[in-house]
Image (cartoon, grey):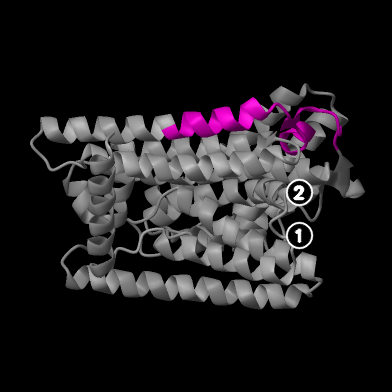
């Protein structure tokens, strides 16, 4: 790509961003700016914040709750809510620990059954919401209580089960790819994949006579992503290398993002968030999509629960409790997923969790009590909801909502 093409691509990109912002479509810009500000402030207050060690630990800490937040994104996209994900994550960890530690089941099979259990729980929720018309708030609130009780019953009187700290689940958050080629290879693969997705989209739109991004703009977008990816890889390689947990998280987020953006099922999810009756008239099986969305939420909650258990090498009565539910929902909303449905991506979960965990990490380094962290996170969440409401109103004024 020539220098002239690069300049033209950059100009087209900035013009597109300017038009979207003027129309109220803020996208990921607010949360990206929030991350930059948070990191800058904490780095000024403590020079260890942006150290390779802290950023590597941060990249692992976001995974457990981040996976749960990905499931929340799916539910929010259709304008619903799932309050049970914290309890489901704790139940999945308990089921795995009991099957593997107490009954000697192979780890891989216990993992599969725990994740399938999460999907089954989601199917139950979806049945009551989609088939019987019970409000999702009530169904999942009952699930929050009921699945938490089942978790306590499964764990039994001991209340806590330690898992093998050298086993499969423990390695989910404890294994690192020390070879520098691993992190750089993932960065290169991500950049190439991004270019191919943009390029294929351009070809498809041109073939149908629709306006498409110029090659220069695609090159600029890919270049920016590659710069960020290789910078992250460099930082990770300065500590222990690429964490397996982060790799799994990125694969899940990117894979489900492609499902939402590039498949008929994903378009059905967005359509349902835009209006149930309109989606039904368009021939979408509303019941099936609703049930499937809650199944995705339950599955991601179970996966997140296993990563959280891996982080502490145990499943206990406190698994899935505390602020986990609030953090997962807050991450999805802070990352840009609309509470009104129909707008958001799986990357919202990653960005939102990055904001929340960055605040927690910075507060820990500064020795500030958790109460302040809660107040700051609450303020960020409120700001995100206000921005969402304002953006929605602006989009309506421009006839785009």
Point out the stretch of residues depicted in magenta. Answer: 163-191
The secondary structure type at the circle numbered 1 is loop
- The picture quadrant where one finds residue 135 is bottom left
Image point (64%, 46%), residue name:
63
- In space, the residues marked 2 and 1 are separated at their CA atoms by 9 Å
Q: Nearer the viewer, residue 191 or 82?
A: 191
In the picture of the structure, the residue carrying the numbered disc 2 is 53
Residue 177 point in image, percent of width and height: 70, 29
- Disc 1 residue crowd, few under 14, some 14–19, many 20+, Cα 10 Å: some
Residue 121 visible at all: no
**Magenta-span inclusion, residue 12:** no
Image position of 168 (left or right of 330): right
**Residue projecting furthest to the right:** 158
Residue 153 position within the rendered picture, expressed as x and y whole percent measured from the top left: 79, 47
Label 2–label 1 contact, CB within 8 A = yes
Question: The residue tagged with tag 2: helix, strand or loop?
Answer: helix
Residue 115 at x, y percent in the picture: 62, 35
Say the numbered circle drawn on residue 48: 1
Q: Is residue 89 visible?
A: yes
Q: Residue at x 90, y 48 (%)?
A: 157
| Residue at image point 63% right, 40% down | 234
Could you tell whether 318 is left or right of 359 in the image? Answer: right
Q: Is residue 99 above or below residue 365?
A: above
Residue 167 among magenta residues: yes
**232 up-or-down from 365: above or below:** above
Main structural element of the magenta stretch: helix, strand or loop?
A: helix
Measured as percent of width and height from the top left, residue 196 is found at: 34, 29
Residue 277 found in image quarter: bottom left
**Of the numbered discs in the image, which one, if any, rests on residue 265?**
none
């Amino acid at each position: 790509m020539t220098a002239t093409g690069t300049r033209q691509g950059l100009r087209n990109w900035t013009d597109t961003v300017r038009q979207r912002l003027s129309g109220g479509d803020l996208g990921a810009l607010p949360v990206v700016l929030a991350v930059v500000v948070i990191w800058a402030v904490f780095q000024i207050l403590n020079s260890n914040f942006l150290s390779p060690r802290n950023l590597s630990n941060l990249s692992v800490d976001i995974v457990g709750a981040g996976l749960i937040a990905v499931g929340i994104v799916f539910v929010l996209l259709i304008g619903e809510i799932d309050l049970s994900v914290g309890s489901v994550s704790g139940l999945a960890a308990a089921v795995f620990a009991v099957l593997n530690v107490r009954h000697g089941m192979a780890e891989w099979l216990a993992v599969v059954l725990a994740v399938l259990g999460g999907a089954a729980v989601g199917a139950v929720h979806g049945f009551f919401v989609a088939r019987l018309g019970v409000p999702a708030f009530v169904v999942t609130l009952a699930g929050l209580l009921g699945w938490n009780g089942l978790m306590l019953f499964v764990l039994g009187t001991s209340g806590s089960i330690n898992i093998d700290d050298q086993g499969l689940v423990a390695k989910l958050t404890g294994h690192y790819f020390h070879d520098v080629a691993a992190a750089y290879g993932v960065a290169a693969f991500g950049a190439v994949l991004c270019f191919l997705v943009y390029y294929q989209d351009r070809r498809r739109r041109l073939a149908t006579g629709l306006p498409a991004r110029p090659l220069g703009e695609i090159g600029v977008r890919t270049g920016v992503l590659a710069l960020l990816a290789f910078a992250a890889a460099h930082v990770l390689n300065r500590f222990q290398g690429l964490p397996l947990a982060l790799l799994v998280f990125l694969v899940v987020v990117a894979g489900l993002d492609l499902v939402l953006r590039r498949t008929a099922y994903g378009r059905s999810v967005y359509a349902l968030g835009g209006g149930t009756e309109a989606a039904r008239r368009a021939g979408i099986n509303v019941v099936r999509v609703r049930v499937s969305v809650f199944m995705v939420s339950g599955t991601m909650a179970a996966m997140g629960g296993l990563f959280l258990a891996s982080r502490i090498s145990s499943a206990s009565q406190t698994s899935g409790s505390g602020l986990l539910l609030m953090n997962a929902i807050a991450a999805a909303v802070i990352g840009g997923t609309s509470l009104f449905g129909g707008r958001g991506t799986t990357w919202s979960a990653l960005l939102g969790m990055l904001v929340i965990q960055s605040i927690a990490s910075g507060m820990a380094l500064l020795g500030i009590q958790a109460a302040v962290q809660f107040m700051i996170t609450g303020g960020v969440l409120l700001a995100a909801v206000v921005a969402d409401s304002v953006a929605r109103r602006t989009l309506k004024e421009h006839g785009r909502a």
